[in-house]
Amino acid sequence: MYCPACNFFANNTLVCVNCGKKFPQPRKPRWARSGARGSENRSYMKVILILILVGAFYGLYAKYFKPGDFPSAGIPSGIYTSRSLPSYMTDGSVNLKKSIVKGKTNIIDFYSEYCPPCKRISPFLKKLDARRGDIVVIKIDINRTGIKGIDWDSPVAKQFMLKSIPYFIVISPGGNLMCEGKEAYNYVVQQLRVEGLA
């Protein structure tokens, strides 16, 4: 590099060894500066990505693996509320007194996997159950194991004399029958409207 003041050649120095004038500082190319900033941005992005993943895993854990209230209420294993929402299928009759969660309003939904209206309302019942701490939705599949189509001859269908599904029974927090059939359906629709789901 030549000194601009005395035209003396000085290699790899920041000050001219002949006259003592400082050479202008070499600037980093634009791509090098942006690369440095980019590495900082990538560090922030890694932290944000880790936080998002942790939040997602926690959300999945809380949604699918958090135990509900029903085991402490004495509900036998094999009976599920919609908080975990595998359905409860039985090949025999149903004892509602053992199935309900005391201290909450129980909406018992008799349904079949082969019933289109049952499938349409199921996601809304799941949301209602998740939003309302005072309501528990218990789903009971009327079909016996291995039966395809709506099983109108199943013990459950005969026990409750079911002619159409979905069929609802609503039981009060005290364990008393509040309503069933059409009246219970209207109650369920009303609760869905209160939550803005219908």
Image: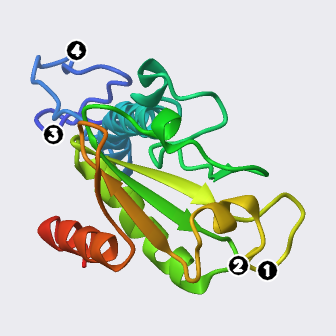
Q: Nearer the viewer, residue 77 or 158?
A: 158
Q: Is residue 43 above or below residue 74?
A: below
Which residue is disc 2 drawn over?
114
Structural crowding at the residue carrying mark 2, measured as other residues with C-alpha within 10 Å and reported as few (<14), some (14–19) or many (≥20): few
Which residue is disc 1 drawn over?
149
Rendered location of residue 138, percent (x, y) = 47, 50
Residue sitting at x 85%, y 75%: 148
Eye-nearest disc, 1 or 4? 1
Image quadrant in which the C terminus is located: bottom left
Rendered location of residue 112, percent (x, y) = 65, 71
Are the two marked residues, 2 and 4, in contact with CB atoms closer than 8 angstroms?
A: no
Q: Is residue 121 above or below residue 171?
A: below
Rendered location of residue 141, percent (x, y) = 65, 60
Q: Is residue 142 left or right of residue 192?
A: right
- Which of pointers 1 and 4 lies earlier in the amino acid sequence? 4
Disc number placed over residue 4 in the picture, else none: 3
- Which of pointers 3 and 4 lies earlier in the amino acid sequence? 3
Residue sitting at x 19%, y 33%: 25
Which residue is disc 4 drawn over?
17
Can residue 168 be seen at all in this image of the molecule? yes
Are the two marked residues, 2 and 1, in contact with CB atoms closer than 8 angstroms?
A: yes
